[in-house]
C-alpha cells in the first residue's frame, strides 16, 4: 500500500523540479531569518539568487552537529518563537544537547511522512500499534505516535520500561504492530521467554525498527523470536525524527521522503558530493522545514544512495543500510572497526546471545579490543575444552572480519546490560585517560 | 555409582562464587564437595549437593548458568593405595579421565571421576 502516490511515485523529472523550487524558497528563507546561514553564505560569496535548480545545492554550506551545539539553544531557529508549538532535544552525552523547534506545519509534515512509512510496512487503520520508543524529549515516541494516529490505527503509547506489563498488553489487547529500537525488540523477546509466553500467543505481525543501526542478521533474529516482519525506519531529530526514510515490502534499501528531505552522499574528508552507489556520509537538507531548517546537515551516518525504479512502484531514492557512523568508528591499532561488524559475526553463531560489548583500551601504548559475549544456555558445557573451542571459533571469525585480533570473553547469559532505548555496545577506556 | 553433579559457568568476577554459595545457603542446600576449574576469563565450578533438582531450580531462578553432568562417584577406604588401584583398573581398560576430585570423611574417601566413557567405567569397576 502507498499512502501518498502523488509524492511517493512522482516522476524523477517532476521530483527534481519540486525539489529545486523548494530549495530556492528555503535558501531565501534561511538567508533572511538565520544569521548563521547568512554569514556563512556571504563568506562563501553565495547569494540566494545563485540557487536555481536542485543541483545548485553543492554551492551551499554544510551544517554540523557542532554548529547546532555552538548555536544552542535557538540560534538556528528560523521561525519566530510564537510559531513554535513543540520542542524536542537530542541526547547530549557530551556538551550541549541539540534543541529542535517545530511549527504546526512541521508537525503536520512529520505525521504525513510517518504515515507513509507505516503504510509501506503494511500497517492499516485496523491495526493496534504499540509505540515503544521513549516518549519525551526524544523524537521517537511522539513522532511515531502521531503517525499512527494520522493513519487511523489505534495507538498504544507504551513507551519503554515495564516490559512485562507491556508484553501482557501486547497479548491481551491483541497488539499487531510495534515501533521500537531493534535492541528493545530483542529485550522484549528475551522477556517473553522469561515469562514463558510463546510467540504464538501474541499477535505481533509488523515491527518498525530504527533509531540505531542494525544488521540483516539481527532482523532475522528478531523476526524469528517475535514472529513478526521487521522493517527499517530511519530518522534523526535534527532533520525531523523518525520518518525520514522507510523500507517497502521489497526491503531493498529505505525510500527517502525526498520531497521533504533532500539526500546527498559526500566524501567525509574532501566534502565532495559522491555519485549514487558510492559509500560515504549521508547529508540532508530539510526542504520544507519552518522551525529549524538545515542546509546540508552532515548526519555522520555512512551508507550509499540508490536510484532506479523499485518494484513497489515508488520512485524515490533509496538509502542502503547504515554501515556505521563516522563517529562510531573505532580506530584500533590504525584499523577501522565498526561495532556492526562484530555484531554480524556474533549473530551468525547460534552459540551466542545477540548481546555484546566492546571494551577498547590502551595497554603499554598498544590498543586492545575485548569482545564480551554471552553464551546461550543450551551451549554451555562441563567440558572446558569445548568451551575454549567455542571461544576460539569466535576469535578466528572476528580476526578474519576485522583484520585484528580481539580478545573474546565468554560471559554468563544476562550479564551484559540490556538497553531499553538505543543499545550501547562500546566502552572506550582510552578516552578516559 | 553414577551421580549427578552441578557444573556452573562463572565469569571471572569478584564475588561471583560467593553468590552461588549464598543462594545455596539461603535455600538450605549443603555442598558436599566441589572443585573449581579456571581459565583466564571464566571458570567452571563443579558441585556435589544432596538435592540436585532443587539446587538447579534456585540457581536458574537467579540467572546462574548451571548444567547437570553425570559423573562417577567411587567410594573407597581412606588408606594409601586405594585410589591407585581404581585408576589402575581404568587405565588398563583404556578409560581416559577428563577431570577428578576427591573428598575424604574419616575412614572412607569419595572420588568424583569424569571418565570419557562413563558406562564402561562403571562396568570395569563393579
Image (cartoon, grey):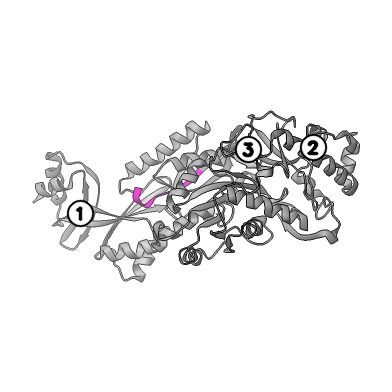
Q: Position of residue A133 (x, y in %)?
A: 60, 57
Q: Residue at x 90, y 42 (%)?
A: A39
Q: Is residue A213 left or right of residue B44?
A: right
Label 2 resides on the chain identified as A
Q: Residue at x 77, y 39 (%)?
A: A18
Q: Is residue A420 left or right of residue B56?
A: right
Mark 1, residues whose alpha carbon is within 10 Å: few (<14), some, or many (≥20)?
some
Q: Position of residue A129 (x, y in %)?
A: 55, 59
Structural distance between the alpha carbons of marks 3 and 2: 19 Å
Structural distance between the alpha carbons of marks 1 and 3: 67 Å
Q: Which residue is mark 1?
A: B111
Q: Are marks 2 and 1 on the same chain?
A: no
Quadrant housing residue A21:
top right
Mark 3, residues whose alpha carbon is within 10 Å: few (<14), some, or many (≥20)?
many
Indicate yes or no whether the magenta region holds residue A424. Answer: no
Eye-nearest disc, 1 or 3:
3
Q: Which residue is mark 2?
A: A20
A382 and A323: which is toward the camera: A323
Quadrant housing residue A24:
top right
Which range is magenta? A371-379
Helix, strand or loop status at disc 1: strand
Eye-nearest disc, 3 or 2:
2
Q: Residue A35: in sight, yes or no?
A: yes
Q: Residue at x 31, y 71 (%)?
A: B28
Q: Are marks 3 and 2 on the same chain?
A: yes
Earlier in the chain: of badge 3 and badge 2, it is 2
Mark 2, residues whose alpha carbon is within 10 Å: few (<14), some, or many (≥20)?
many
Indicate yes or no whether the magenta region holds residue A376. Answer: yes
A206 w.r.t. A43: above or below: below
Q: Which residue is mark 3?
A: A318
Quadrant housing residue B108:
bottom left
Q: Position of residue B122 (x, y in %)?
A: 13, 50
Amino acid at each position: 500500500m502507498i499512502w501518498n502516490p502523488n509524492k511517493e511515485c512522482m516522476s524523477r523529472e517532476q521530483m527534481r523540479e519540486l525539489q529545486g523550487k523548494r530549495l530556492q524558497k528555503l535558501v531565501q528563507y534561511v538567508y533572511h531569518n538565520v544569521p548563521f546561514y547568512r554569514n556563512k553564505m556571504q563568506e562563501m560569496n553565495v547569494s540566494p539568487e545563485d540557487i536555481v535548480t536542485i543541483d545548485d545545492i553543492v554551492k551551499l554550506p554544510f551544517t554540523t552537529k557542532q554548529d547546532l551545539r555552538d548555536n544552542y539553544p535557538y540560534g538556528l531557529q528560523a521561525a519566530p518563537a510564537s510559531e513554535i508549538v513543540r520542542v524536542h532535544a537530542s541526547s547530549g552525552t557530551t556538551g550541549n544537547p541539540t534543541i529542535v523547534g517545530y511549527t504546526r506545519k512541521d508537525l503536520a509534515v512529520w505525521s504525513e511522512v510517518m504515515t507513509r512509512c507505516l503504510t509501506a510496512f503494511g500497517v492499516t487503520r485496523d491495526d493496534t500499534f504499540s509505540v515503544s520508543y521513549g516518549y519525551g524529549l526524544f523524537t521517537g515516541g511522539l513522532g511515531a505516535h502521531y503517525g499512527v494516529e494520522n493513519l487511523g490505527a489505534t495507538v498504544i503509547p507504551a513507551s519503554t520500561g515495564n516490559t512485562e506489563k507491556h508484553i501482557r498488553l501486547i497479548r491481551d489487547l491483541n497488539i499487531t504492530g510495534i515501533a521500537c529500537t531493534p535492541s528493545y525488540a530483542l529485550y522484549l523477546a528475551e522477556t517473553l521467554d522469561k515469562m514463558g509466553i510463546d510467540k504464538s500467543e501474541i499477535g505481533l505481525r509488523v515491527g518498525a525498527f530504527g533509531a540505531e543501526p542494525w544488521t540483516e542478521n539481527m532482523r532475522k533474529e528478531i523476526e524469528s523470536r517475535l514472529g513478526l516482519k521487521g522493517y527499517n525506519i530511519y530518522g534523526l531529530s535534527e532533520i525531523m525524527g523518525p520518518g525520514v526514510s522507510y523500507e517497502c515490502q521489497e526491503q531493498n534499501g529505505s525510500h527517502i521522503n525526498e520531497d521533504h528531505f533532500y539526500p546527498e552522499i559526500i566524501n567525509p574528508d574532501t566534502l565532495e558530493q559522491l555519485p549514487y552507489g558510492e559509500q560515504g556520509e549521508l547529508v540532508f537538507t530539510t526542504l520544507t522545514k519552518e522551525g529549524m531548517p538545515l542546509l546540508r546537515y552532515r548526519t555522520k551516518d555512512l551508507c550509499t544512495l540508490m536510484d532506479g525504479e523499485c518494484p513497489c512502484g515508488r520512485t524515490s531514492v533509496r538509502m542502503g543500510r547504515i554501515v556505521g557512523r563516522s563517529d562510531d568508528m573505532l580506530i584500533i591499532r590504525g584499523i577501522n572497526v565498526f561495532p556492526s561488524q562484530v555484531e554480524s559475526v556474533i549473530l551468525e553463531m547460534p552459540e551466542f546471545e545477540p548481546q555484546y560489548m566492546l571494551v577498547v583500551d590502551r595497554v603499554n601504548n598498544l590498543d586492545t579490543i575485548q569482545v564480551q559475549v554471552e553464551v546461550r544456555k543450551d551451549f554451555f558445557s562441563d567440558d572446558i575444552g569445548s568451551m575454549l573451542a567455542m571461544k576460539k571459533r569466535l576469535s578466528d571469525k572476528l580476526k578474519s572480519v576485522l583484520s585484528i585480533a580481539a580478545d573474546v570473553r565468554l560471559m554468563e547469559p544476562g550479564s551484559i546490560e540490556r538497553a531499553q532505548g538505543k543499545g550501547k555496545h562500546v566502552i572506550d577506556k582510552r578516552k578516559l585517560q | 555409582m553414577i551421580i549427578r553433579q552441578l557444573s556452573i559457568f562463572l565469569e571471572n568476577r569478584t564475588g561471583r562464587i560467593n553468590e552461588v554459595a549464598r543462594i545455596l545457603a539461603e535455600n538450605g542446600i549443603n555442598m558436599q564437595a566441589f572443585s573449581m576449574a579456571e581459565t583466564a576469563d571464566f571458570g567452571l565450578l563443579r558441585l556435589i549437593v544432596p538435592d540436585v533438582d532443587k539446587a538447579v531450580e534456585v540457581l536458574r531462578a537467579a540467572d546462574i548458568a548451571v548444567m547437570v553432568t553425570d559423573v562417577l562417584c567411587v567410594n573407597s577406604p581412606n588408606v594409601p593405595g586405594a585410589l591407585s588401584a581404581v585408576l589402575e583398573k581404568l587405565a588398563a581398560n583404556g578409560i581416559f579421565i577428563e577431570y577428578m576430585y576427591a573428598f575424604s570423611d574419616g575412614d572412607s574417601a569419595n572420588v568424583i571421576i569424569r571418565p570419557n566413557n562413563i558406562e564402561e567405567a562403571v562396568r570395569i569397576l563393579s
